[in-house]
Image: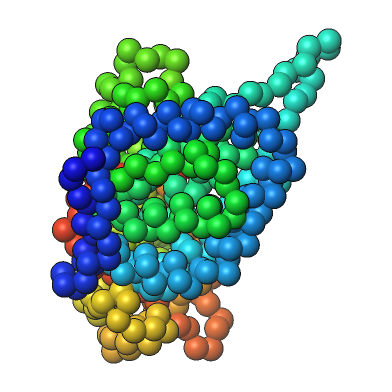
Amino acid sequence: MSATLESVSPSDPSDVVGRFPSADDAAVADGVARAREAFPHWRDAGAAARAAVLERFARIASERAAELSVLIAREVGKARWDALAEARLLAPKVAVTLAEGMDLVRAHEAAPGQRATYRPRGVLAVCGPFNFPAHLPNGHIAPALATRNTVVFKPSAIAPAVGAWMAERWRDAGLPDGVLEVVQGGPETGRALARADVDGILFTGSYATGRALIEATLDAPQKLLALELGGSNAIIVCADADLDLAVSECALSIAATTGQRCTAARRIFVERPVREAFQHKLVAVLEGLRVTRGSSSSARSRRRRVASACCASTRVAHRPTRARVSCAASRRSSAIPIKGRRSSAPRPRCIRSTISTRRSRPRTTPTTGSPRR
């Protein structure tokens, strides 16, 4: 483990967020071996003991969400309001895992006289993203630990500090040594982890990386391979749509995280009667967006500045509950109509969005999350 992974803030090249040893094949194998050694104890610890650790982690993560949001914004360039929204998702994910999630794996009668039970896989590898570096890995780690598995977690090479922060919070929650191992590094570390003695690999991200994982595990059919390879989403704007609302949702889908998320719009289909009006409004809003430093000021003040820029061109109602743009469950496109009555709100709010400062990252960057998100 000789190489060093350096994390630099995309909004300030002089801001070194942290330096981390990059794991080579031997270091990855050592981490997997420690997780393997810890597996029997964690498996047999009892549901109550495991749940207690997960609940403590959720409580700590909730109490320190503001701290995490600053780190996310600083390391990956995400807008502070967006980073805070992500940080606040860690605790609810644990809660749903321990409730509805565990109901899915309880022993049950599969047929008269036949009983089905579930067993842990063993050691699971979790690969992390840069665009949701806390929430999406947490969507794998929490269910894996709750179902008696141990985990080897490789954060994104772009967000190693967030990954390290999460691991520290699990230690604060009392997670035993070896139950969650962290290996930092780039693609070579990821390939080493895929080849290692793990029982499953959980990954959400690009098709290219997913295919590479498939190829790396062709001779290991016993390994669980859970892949969610992005989305290819379309939005349909109907002639009777509330255009301000449609523009708001489309602009947010296009600009949030510079479009580098699975729910980002790739195509917009607009009915001819409203095409020109919609196009004019959308261009005006997008031209009003500003790139700012993710951690240079409060989220509220940045939203106000961006809102002011947008309002100078057009008023945009923002009511997220009135429109939905969802991630495709497979590689097929999903087209979601946006239509409905005009808002009766007396003072519609402007789109509340700044865009990520990490503009140069390709769309192929991994975006890891839960297979059932």
Residue 213 sits in quarter: top left
Please, which residue is most extreme toward the right here? Answer: 113
Residue displayed at 26% across by 30% down: 25
Q: Is residue 125 left or right of residue 211?
A: right
| Residue 10 percent across, percent down from the top left | 21, 66
Residue 69 sits in quarter: bottom left
Residue displayed at 39% across by 35% down: 31
Residue displayed at 64% across by 57% down: 56
As drawn, 285 above or below 173: below
Q: Is residue 8 left or right of residue 257?
A: left
| Residue 364 percent across, percent down from the top left | 24, 44
Q: Is residue 140 left or right of residue 60?
A: left
As drawn, 156 above or below 256: above
As drawn, 243 above or below 297: above
| Residue 285 percent across, percent down from the top left | 28, 76
| Residue 369 percent across, percent down from the top left | 44, 45
Inspect this view and state whether residue 214 appears: no
